Structures are given as structure tokens and as C-alpha cells.
Amino acid sequence: MSFTIKDVARLADVSIATVSRVLNRSKPVSPEVREKVMKVVDELGYNPNPVARTLIMKESMLIGVLIPDIANTFISMFVRGIEKELFQQGYTALLCNTNSDTKVELHYLNLLREKYVDGVVLLTSAPKPEQIDFFNNHDIPVIFSSHTDKDSRFPCINIDDYQASYDATKYLIGLGHRSIAFFCGPMEYYQTIRRFDGYKQALADYGIEFQTKWLFARDYNIESGYKSGMELFAQEDQPTAVCCVSDMVAIGAIRAAEDSGVSVPEDVSIMGFDDIPIAGAYRPALTTIRQPVYDLGAGSAQMLLKQIREKDNYIREAKILPHEIIERESCRVLNN
Amino acid sequence: MSFTIKDVARLADVSIATVSRVLNRSKPVSPEVREKVMKVVDELGYNPNPVARTLIMKESMLIGVLIPDIANTFISMFVRGIEKELFQQGYTALLCNTNSDTKVELHYLNLLREKYVDGVVLLTSAPKPEQIDFFNNHDIPVIFSSHTDKDSRFPCINIDDYQASYDATKYLIGLGHRSIAFFCGPMEYYQTIRRFDGYKQALADYGIEFQTKWLFARDYNIESGYKSGMELFAQEDQPTAVCCVSDMVAIGAIRAAEDSGVSVPEDVSIMGFDDIPIAGAYRPALTTIRQPVYDLGAGSAQMLLKQIREKDNYIREAKILPHEIIERESCRVLNN
DNA sequence: CTGTTAGCGCCTTCAA
DNA sequence: TTGAAGGCGCTAACAG
């Protein structure tokens, strides 16, 4: 159905080598011949077979993007940022949804490698040993996105989790709150630890004692927020504010508050994290920390492309992007 | 870095053809030889290069999945359904996010074709002419998902949009409502028309007159619902219920209601469509029509795989999956 | 049952 | 500057 380089060569009355040369500008070709070839190429609408090309060149102009959970609305803008940058440079993104399943992740990673993708963006706030191993063994350009590599073995891009959490807590303190709970993620995640540290430091800096009973470590989803909320709001001693590790957790917490007969923000202020699309439409609208998701995506792509181009000369970078506090309805000033 | 079939042949002291045969079971091989080869394969961890294989076989064990908008939370479960089925059969899904941009769609479609994907799932409730053309010209197995092909040129899988909308309206009528607005999508979409027809027919069947002033045709997102809501709630004559074309529109409508000083569901009942993940967590929780999204995905994969296997013997199917009414808080019975 | 050989479609030396 | 020829890694006749 499709034409091959042979067809072009025959019709242009040149050798296939020449056709290859005009298409790749790999070696000088006389203007007349080049034109003759291009004419045939245009007429036929010829396109070199990328599979054959990949077999020789060991490159595919493809970038694999591993996303842990396509349900995470955070991802939408991130992907757009990536695609925009890649598209401009002639690369295209292939999305792989892993559901955070280690087996699936490895499956995709190996598939991508075998298909000679030119690089991969790993969107994960908590890289697993298997992932680290893979990239240690395979020398494929990679960017760890939404992750800060404390060992700095891989290039990564992220916000400053510590500072963001510090700022969120400080914001609450600025509103007059002195008793602030923290709904965080699993303590095995480096990200969780960083955010927890930011929270604790803010407390310390303003002379507030940290209370273990107000710390809840579960997951990043609605259910986790709900569970933690139900436990918290059943306690005798209650905080006036809750700092959450994600907007989803915040939404769960708000639902728990409602089900426990405490109202937001009148009885308790609840602070989100991420600023997902629904955050502004939720009721009460979430006051939250906005991550520059689009820029995180675009930045990942830029760094990856740079790495691909510079190869062994590339020096590992760790880019930090700014966050921002978005004030809405779920937090109020405490005056008493 | 990686081993090739030659390495295996040399180490097992057989020809490369034999190695190929034991790996593909394409021709009988004596048990002893088979074992000898497999031993080497296992020791080396050898894996045939899929690119070389694709070049010959013109198949890749890859399925392209075109999604119009990765932000649509509807998609999450859909993708899981697809992946589950494909994985079992040794296929893997490649997600392509198009943002409904026709140029991007065509770019991906051509890329996928050139990469010899074995089929594609097109998730779109409103296929564009360019897409139709592509599949008319290229004879690549495809399933149109979330779309009902009235010309039945392509296999497709969907719920019954007409009936679902009919049921939603009938449900509202059953609650006692007689004045029901309809927030639908662009009237160019066949899906929108079907749903609108269902709404109108339900009205007619229960002797309720259709009112043009209560029909708003915009898009499927929050902003559209909000705008339509602001217009509607500013009118003198107001309905007691609104039937929406998506949960996002319903959420927008609810926000508009709040901003207009009308409360949901006390003053007006609002019905969603889709049952996206946030629907149950939203306040008020959305009463809505649930689409069997996971099954839609799984079904797409099954139909596609069937089509790939049966090739020219495949007879076009059009599968309809059942929907379901989910009662929550946003609609109330009207008693007066 | 097994090995030899000829491609798949392309890029790239090596001569001319 | 151009063409011939040799692969990339694999499958599929064709012989034996």
C-alpha cells in the first residue's frame, strides 16, 4: 500500500542511497538531483518507514511517559505541557498508565526500551527501587518528575515540597490558627517526609507544639482523607485547621467534617494541596497550594530533550519550580 | 547490550531459523533441541527485538487508544477496562491524548499506522469526517467507543443515549417534576441529538410541553453548565428540575444555582450524567446516570481483538451496554 | 526435523 | 557527488 524508498529511487531514476541522502541531509547532493527526488517524494506522499529506520538508527523520536494513575486529574495539564514541548521538536509522547503497579511499570519500561524510545518521563513522587534499578542498568535518558532526588542520581523536576508545606502551615498560622492537624501520605515516601518536615518546622518557628494525635498518615485519595477526618473529628480535643497533602484528601476531610457535624470553614479550616481542576468548583471551594503542573510537564520535556541532545555531556539537573497559595473558601481567619 | 537471535543460535549450536521456530512455535522442533534452545534463551534472558519483528510481520502487538481529553475523569476507568483485556492477550495499549485537536488526531493516527499498531480504539462521542476518512482509507481495525454509528460503517460500543436521557427525564417526572430544563451539548453531535430526543420524548409521553426557553446547548464542561445555569436562574419562569448532559455540566449548574441564590435540591433538582468519580463526593452529591465506563473499555478491547483475529470474516457489531440511575442528593421529590 | 538463504525498508560505509 | 553492497534483527520459504 505504502511506497518504499525503492519506489522513489526508481521513479526519480537515482539510487536508494541518494534518496536517503536528500531525505536525511546526511551527505551533499547536487541541487538538481535533490529537486528531482523531492518532486517524486511529494507526488507519492512518501514517508520513510519509521520501523525500518528505528531498526538501524536505534532511535524512534518517541518519548515514553509513565503515569501512575490516569484518574489523577493533576495529570491532565502535566501531559499537555509535555506534549507541547515534544511536538515542537518532532517528538511524540506515548502515555503509559501503570496504576502504580510495579509489574505493569516494568512491563512498560521494557517495552519502551525494546521499541527504542529516545527517553522517558517518569511521573512519580515516590520512585521504586525497581525503577531506579532499571535506569541504572539501561542508560536510557529519563526525568523523574514530581520527585526530588535526594541522592541526585537522576535529573528531576519538582516543586519544593518542604517549602510548600511550610508555607501552607504558615498561612494557616497567619490566619490565627494555633492548633493544626496534618493529613499526610505514607511515611515511606520521601515526598511525604519532606512535606511533614515543612509542617513541623513552621509549627516550631511559631512556637507551636507538634501533636502526634493530630497527625494522620494514609494515602493521597478521597477515602484516606475521609477516614482520617472521621477519626479526627471524633476526638475530644480538636484542631481549628487541617493541612492536607492533596486536594483529594482535603475533599475527603471536608466530607468527614460534614458527616461529623462540624462545618468548614466555620468550625475548622481545611487546606488542600495541588489545585486540581475541581478545587475551585468544589463546595466549599478549596484554599490550596497550586503546583505549576503545566510547567512541570513542559520542563520535564525540555530537560529530557536537552539530555538526549547532549548525551554523555549532559550534567544532571534538579529543577525546582515555584508554588503558590490559592485563597478560596475552605480556610477562614480565626478571631477570638 | 542486548542479545540477538544469532547469539542464541551460536550458544545453542543451532541455526537462527531453529531458534525462531522454537520461539514462535511456527514449525515442529524436536524436544531435545527445543530444550537446548530454551536453556540458552533463559540464561541470556533473551527477548526477540520487536522492532525487527514488526518490520517483517507488519504487526506490533500494540493497540492505539485515542482519547480526546485526558482531563475527563470519565476516562480513567475506561482505560483500565481496555488495558485489562489487552494485557491478558499479550497486547499493550498506547494512550494518545489529542485534546480533540483534529491535527493532533491525524498525527497520531498516522504515527500509529506507520508503527503498525494492530488496531485502534477511538474514544469519541462525535467522530469527525477526517477520522472517518482515515479508517475508510486505511483498513486498520478500529472500534468507535462511546459513539453510536447511525450509518453503521464501523463497529462501535456505547450506552443507549436516547434511552438513558429518556430515563433520566422520566425519573425526574416520577419525582413529581413537570417543568424540566435541559442542559445539553452542541447540537452538531449526534450524541447530543439522541439525548435531546430522549428528553423530549419522555416529556411528550407524560403530556408535558417542551419549552425552548429551557433548552441550553453548550459544551460538556463546568463552565458551560455554569453559564447556562446563570442564564436560566435569571429567568422569570423557572423549572423545578434540570437534566444535564454530563456531571461536569451539573456541577457548573449547581454553582450557578448557588450564586443565584437558589438552592439544590430544595428549589431546583439537578440531574447529572456519567457518574464520574467526584460525583459522589461533591456537595450535594450528584444524582446521575451511571455509564458502565469500565465495561465500555473492556468491551472495546474485546471487540477490537475479535476483529483483529477474524480479519475479513469479522462482521461489524454495535454493542449497547446498560446504564443505571444513581440516586443521591441533588434531586428531590416534589410534593405540593 | 533442521540449515541455508533471501528479504522486510532503511542507512551507511566503500569505491568510483 | 553518486551507486553498489552490506548489514540492523528477525521470519519464511526452500532445500535437504
Image (spheres, coloured by chain):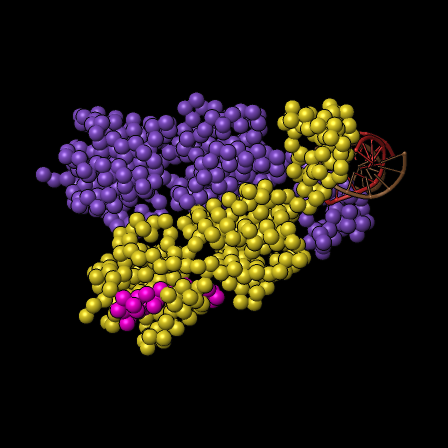
Chain colours: A yellow, B purple, C brown, D red
Q: Measuring 26% from the left and 37% from the top, which residue is drawn there?
A: B228
Q: Quadrant of residue B126?
A: top left
Q: Is residue A143 visible?
A: yes
The one of B10 and A65 positioned closer to us in this rendering: A65
**In the displayed structure image, the side of residue A115 where residue B334 appears, left or right:** left
* Position of residue B29 measured from the top left corner of the image (x, y, whole percent): 75, 42
* Position of residue C1 measured from the top left corner of the image (x, y, whole percent): 78, 41
- Looking at the rendering, the stretch of residues picked out in magenta corresponds to A168-192
In the picture, which quadrant includes the C terminus of chain A? bottom left
Tell which residue pokes out farthest to the top in this image: B151
Tell which residue pokes out farthest to the left in this image: B336
Magenta stretch: residue A179 in it?
A: yes
Q: Measuring 51% from the left and 44% from the top, which residue is drawn there?
A: A84
Q: Measuring 18% from the left and 41% from the top, which residue is drawn there?
A: B268
The one of B294 and A12 positioned closer to us in this rendering: A12
Instruction: State the count of labels.
Output: 0
Q: Quadrant of residue B323?
A: top left
Q: Is residue B325 visible?
A: no
* Position of residue B155 measured from the top left corner of the image (x, y, whole percent): 47, 28
Does A233 sit above or below residue B274? below
Does A179 sit above or below residue A147? below
Q: Measuring 41% from the left and 49% from the top, which residue is drawn there?
A: A73
Magenta stretch: residue A258 in it?
A: no
Does B95 sit above or below residue A10? below
* Position of residue B33 measured from the top left corner of the image (x, y, whole percent): 77, 47
The one of A9 and A245 positioned closer to us in this rendering: A9
**In the displayed structure image, the side of residue B162 where residue B7 appears, left or right:** right
In the picture, which quadrant includes the N terminus of chain A? top right
